[in-house]
Each structure stands twice: as structure tokens, then as C-alpha cells.
């Protein structure tokens, strides 16, 4: 099971990306400080919805999520030439969050297991993962919330006696 620690790790990865991006002169040349501040506010709202969905389930944050999506889409409509960069920044943060959450969850799989007095190591892992390929901000926010509230990552892990193939 994914824990609060896994969520914290994923959010930390986004925060690290965010700090690097906000010190990036290219980003500063595209978005002014007020837009960067608004971008952070929208992201903080998305983060809060994800956190609440993790604890209470996605149904409890349905209205909150729709409000965040509406605010973000309205802001992008009003942002003119900056809309593409705003969209790009939010999508990058969502991608980093989802990838980091999955990576963190994968660390929950024990590299070895003991049966009796014999140690078995991972010899093979198969992963089934659904990817969202669309660029819709709404779809990607909803997918991140779905993943945290009730998402599944299908894994098949095989162990073999000895040091393992991995």
C-alpha cells in the first residue's frame, strides 16, 4: 500500500522541479512573477485535492477538483500567449508527481524474500500501467487524483533462489 511517505516523496520531487524552473531565466522570460505566483497557487490547490483524495477518496474532492480545473482553464484562456507555457508547467508537475509516486511505490516491493531458511531474490518483474496520452489538463488532474485515491499498478514479481537476475 502507498503511504503518506510515498505522497510526500512525490510532492518533494515536484517542489524540487518547481524551484529549478522558477530560477530558470527562460521561464521568467515567458511568465512574469504574477503568473508564476498564480501557477504556484493553482498547483498548491491541485496538491491539496490530491492529498485529500488520498485520505478521503476522490468523491469527497469532486467539487473542489472541478473548481480547480475551472479556475485553471479560465486563467489559461485569459493568459493569451502565456497559456501554452502555463499548461506546459502544470502538465510537467503532474507528470513528475505521477512518475515519482509510482517510483516510490515500486520501492515497497521487497528485493528478497525468505521462505524457511532460503533467500529468494527478484528474478523478473512485469508491470502493467495505464498511460494517459492526452494533453487535457482536466483529464490529467483527474487521473492523478484517481491514482492516489484508488489507482492500481499491476505488478508481477518472480523470485528465484540465489542472487537473482536483476
Image: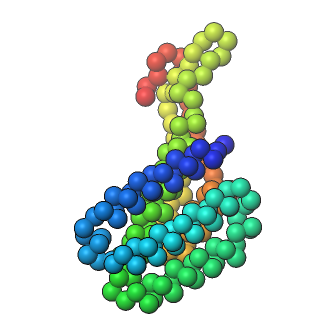
> Quarter of the image holding residue 70?
bottom right
What percent of the width, then of the height, locates residue 104?
52, 43
Residue occupying the point 70% across, 69% down = 61
Front residue of 113 and 69 = 69
Instruction: Please tell me whether residue 121 is drawn above or below residue 116 in the rendered image.
Output: below
Where, quadrant-wise, is the N terminus in this rendering?
A: top right
Q: Position of residue 155 (x, y in %)?
A: 58, 42
- Horizontal and vertical percent position of residue 38: 46, 76
Q: Quadrant of residue 57?
A: bottom right
At x 33%, y 77%, the residue is 31
Viewer-side residue, 129 vs 2:
2
The location of residue 77, given as percent across then percent down, is 45, 89
Most extreme residue toward the top is 117
> Which residue is at the front of the view, 26 or 149?
26
| Residue drawn 71% across the image and 55% down it | 55
Residue at 63% from the left image edge and 52% from the top image edge: 152
Whether 61 is drawn above or below 113: the answer is below
Which image quarter is the C terminus in? top left
Name the side, left or right, on which 19 lies relative to 155: left
Whether residue 159 is situated above or below residue 117 in the rendered picture: below
Let me know if residue 154 appears in the view: no
Q: Describe residue 2's horizontal placement relative to residue 73 as left or right.
A: right
Position of residue 94 in the picture relative to residue 57 (left or right): left
Seen in the picture, residue 121 relative to 130 is either above or below; the reply is above
Amino acid at each position: 500500500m502507498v503511504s503518506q511517505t510515498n505522497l510526500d516523496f512525490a510532492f518533494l520531487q515536484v517542489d524540487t522541479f518547481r524551484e529549478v524552473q522558477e530560477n530558470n531565466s527562460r521561464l521568467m522570460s515567458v511568465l512574469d512573477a504574477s503568473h508564476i505566483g498564480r501557477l504556484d497557487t493553482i498547483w498548491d490547490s491541485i496538491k491539496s485535492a490530491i492529498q485529500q483524495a488520498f485520505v478521503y477518496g476522490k468523491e469527497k474532492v469532486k467539487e473542489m477538483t472541478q473548481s480547480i480545473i475551472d479556475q485553471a482553464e479560465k486563467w489559461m484562456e485569459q493568459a493569451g500567449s502565456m497559456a501554452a507555457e502555463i499548461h506546459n508547467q502544470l502538465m510537467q508537475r503532474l507528470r513528475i508527481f505521477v512518475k515519482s509516486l509510482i517510483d516510490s511505490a515500486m520501492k515497497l516491493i521487497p528485493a528478497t524474500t525468505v521462505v524457511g531458511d532460503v533467500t529468494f531474490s527478484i528474478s523478473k518483474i512485469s508491470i502493467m500501467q495505464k498511460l494517459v496520452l492526452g494533453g487535457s489538463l482536466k483529464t490529467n488532474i483527474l487521473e492523478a487524483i484517481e491514482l492516489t485515491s484508488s489507482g492500481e499498478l499491476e505488478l508481477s514479481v518472480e523470485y528465484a533462489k540465489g542472487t537473482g537476475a536483476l
